[in-house]
Image (spheres, helix red, strand yellow):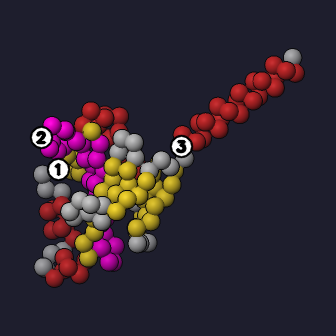
């Protein structure tokens, strides 16, 4: 009986540890902006025009771009005008006080689903684009929003 109890206790411990590791997250910092993603993501410098950084996961890529607030203000644009331009052509939604947009993009052979957020601090407007294969849209739509909600500006 003790042996059975020990085996069951060990199994419970392994299952609990496995469940916790699946929910492990990591927070990345880009200057004064942080974002929390699943632990498996890797940061890379972006080689895409208009983006400064990427975080790459197994099925999801996050693109980060930034524009100095001073550059935007030099054109006489306010925050509302910037948001209207940024979300143009997207399906704009709100969840828990956060505005975000979704859209699809096709590059000839591949179709992608994007969830987009615009964030502003004293220094930058941050563009955060989360992209996945359109076939994974249904499965990844909610996790994409959760990642956007983790953005924090210091």
Asked which secondary structure carries label 2, the reply is loop
Residue that numbered label 1 is attached to: 90
Q: Is residue 52 above or below residue 3?
A: below
Asked which secondary structure carries label 1, the reply is loop
In percent of width and height, residue 125 lies at 27, 70
In percent of width and height, residue 132 lies at 29, 42
Quadrant placement of the C terminus: bottom left
Q: How many angstroms separate mark 2 from mark 1 (CA)?
A: 20 Å
Residue that numbered label 2 is attached to: 108
Q: Are marks 2 and 3 in contact (CB under 8 Å)?
A: no
Q: Is residue 103 magenta?
A: no
Left or right side of 12 for 121: left
Left or right side of 98 for 1: right
As drawn, the label of residue 147 is: none
Q: Would residue 57 be seen by someone viewing this image from the given angle?
A: yes
Q: Can you tell which of label 2 and label 3 is closer to the viewer? A: 2
Q: Which residues are magenta?
A: 104-132
Front position in the image: 56 or 122? 56
Q: Is residue 135 above or below residue 61?
A: above
């Amino acid at each position: 009986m003790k042996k059975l109890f020990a085996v069951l206790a060990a199994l419970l411990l392994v299952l609990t540890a496995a469940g916790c590791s699946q929910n492990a997250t990591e927070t990345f910092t880009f200057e004064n902006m942080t974002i929390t993603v699943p632990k498996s993501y890797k940061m890379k410098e972006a080689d895409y025009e208009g983006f400064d950084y990427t975080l790459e996961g197994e099925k999801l890529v996050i693109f980060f771009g930034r524009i100095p607030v001073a550059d935007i203000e030099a054109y006489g644009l306010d925050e509302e005008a910037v948001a209207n331009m940024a979300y143009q052509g997207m399906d704009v939604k709100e969840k828990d006080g956060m505005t975000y947009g979704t859209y699809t993009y096709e590059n000839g052979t591949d179709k992608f689903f994007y969830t987009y957020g615009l964030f502003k601090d004293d220094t930058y407007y941050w563009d955060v684009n989360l992209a996945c294969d359109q076939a994974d849209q249904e499965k990844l739509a909610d996790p994409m929003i959760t990642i956007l909600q983790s953005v924090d500006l210091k």
